[in-house]
Amino acid sequence: MYLNRNIYLILFLFLMGCKDKNVIVSVTQPVIPVLTLKETNPVLKIELKRGRPIDYSIKQIDLSLSGTNDIGDVQSVQLFQSDENGEFSTKNQIWETLSAASRITFKGNFPVKADTLGFWVSVKLKNKIDLTHRIHISCQNILTDRGIVDLPSDQSSNDLRVGVALRQNDQDHINTSRIPGLATSKEGTLLAVCDARRESSRDLQGNIDVILQSSTDGGQSWQPLQVILDRGKWGGLPEKFNGISDACILVDEQTGAIFVAGLWMYGVLDDNGQWINGLTEESTVWKHQWMEKGSQPGFGVKQTSQFLITKSTDDGLTWNDPINITPTNKKKEWWLYAPAPGHGITLSDGTLVFPTDGLDENGVPFSNITWSEDHGETWITSNPAYKNTSECMAVQLSDGSIMLNMRAGRQGRIVCTTRDLGETWVEHPTSEKTLIEPGCMASLHKHICHQDGEIKSILLFSNPNSKTDRDHITIKVSYDNGNTWPKDKWILLDELSGRGYSCLTSVNDSVIGIFYECSQADIAFQEIPIKEFLK
């Protein structure tokens, strides 16, 4: 009986054209990824404010998915009341979950007694969709028991990019997944590596392994994780004192071999740089390798963190026991020598290059490269490119030189080039002037594509596009070897705050992939058609 009365009221108000002038509506839509493998994805925020203290009830909300590439990508749509700060929360769902359609109508009776009410529209995607698609959703109508509410004529509405929530909090009994690396094998397999921080989100030292997930269908589906670097209870210490972190993946473009480097920390050094004896599962001491004297001069496992490399020759299916290049490649006086997270490169002559970093004889951070001319049999460490820098990534420019783009932590990225594999370095004219940062790892990648019968080379760069916070994850493109990055070609992926690390790869000739720490998952994977970057 009540339902009939409710329908009659709605019809009456529509026919009479009654307006509820007491309620003012705002509709906002942050630019964020909409991800598969998640139950909820906030896509639209609606806020209602009453002009006078008159209670009312919401009777109907109409939404539209018109403009979405494929409505079949969306499995269901929900409404959730905002939390006390107006942020997305799944605590209070409004009305029932509805299946996706071009037009979605929520009906019911939701009493409103507060001056301000906020709620979010959330969608659930199907698990396997075209990752170049976008979701378009808008609010078409809101009806209260007093009439139709006027919607803002300028309500924001974005075409939100889809992606995969590849690593989520507490997934696979892993507290937090961090530090993404991404590469495409010679066979076209996508290889995503990251930290499995099993007990907490904290950096080394801790129970941390390097894991890999692979995709053979361009990122639409992913294989279960593989643990590829794990020292277990080496040396009689618990796993939380045998952590491995900061993976960097490198594909040998000539042989097809795949290398993954990681930094192993055995035990903990005290404030004086001395190894602590007697550590047990109950011990709570902690020290980061970059902090104070967390890693020290020397080569031994009780002196300094160790640089490990594992190798696969079967497209990432199996991995060799790691080799330790610390004794052969670290300068004894350096406090730390480590892989820089992300991916390495193969030069045109077949030389393999890992981006690396460390702490010099005075504990001052630096960035450099480590390279091999014999397909990874032996490795050579370059001179530092710059001081007071750390995480870095490299590309080979069209003139054959190597560009190293470095985290500096002072609002601008440091950029240097070398023509002799890091024996000498020259600071680039754009250094600290062109690409901004809040102090965060970033990704630099060269993509080769075909356009109008010509082979073209472009550079792509991703990081939080901010000087202060790890938000506004943005991909930028350069057509001139990194001299300029045209603003009209910037692509914003996620404007909200996350941990901010990212890594780019070429999925194929026409698609770019990014594996990054976003606001909606520990690490997400997204794809962008290369045509969006081209002139």
Image (spheres, grey):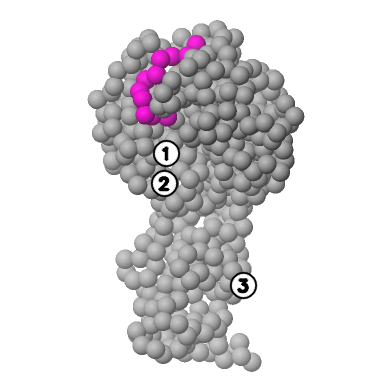
The quarter of the picture where the N terminus appears is: bottom right
State yes or no: residue 326 in magenta. Answer: no
Q: Is residue 322 visible?
A: yes
Residue type indicated by callout 3: Glu
Look at 46% across and 43% down and name the residue there: 500
Closer to us: 176 or 401: 176
> What residue is pinned by disc 2?
470
Residue located at (47% from left, 38% from top) = 502
Q: What stretch is highlighted in magenta?
A: 380-390
How crowded pointer 3 is (Cα within 10 Å; few <14, some 14-19, many 20+) is rated as few
Residue 281 to residue 36: above or below: above
Q: Residue furthest top?
A: 374
In this rendering, position of residue 312 left or right of residue 329: right
> Does the magenta segment cover residue 389?
yes
Is 11 located above or below residue 471 in the figure? below
- The image position of residue 497, as x and y in percent, is 44, 51
Which comes sooner in the sequence, label 1 or label 2?
1
Residue at image position (54%, 65%) is 89
| Tag 1 and tag 2, C-beta contact below 8 Å | yes
- Secondary element type, mark 3: strand
Q: SS for tag 2?
A: loop
Q: Say which label, 3 or 1, has the lower sequence index.
A: 3
| Mark number displayed over residue 96 | 3
Residue carrying label 1: 440
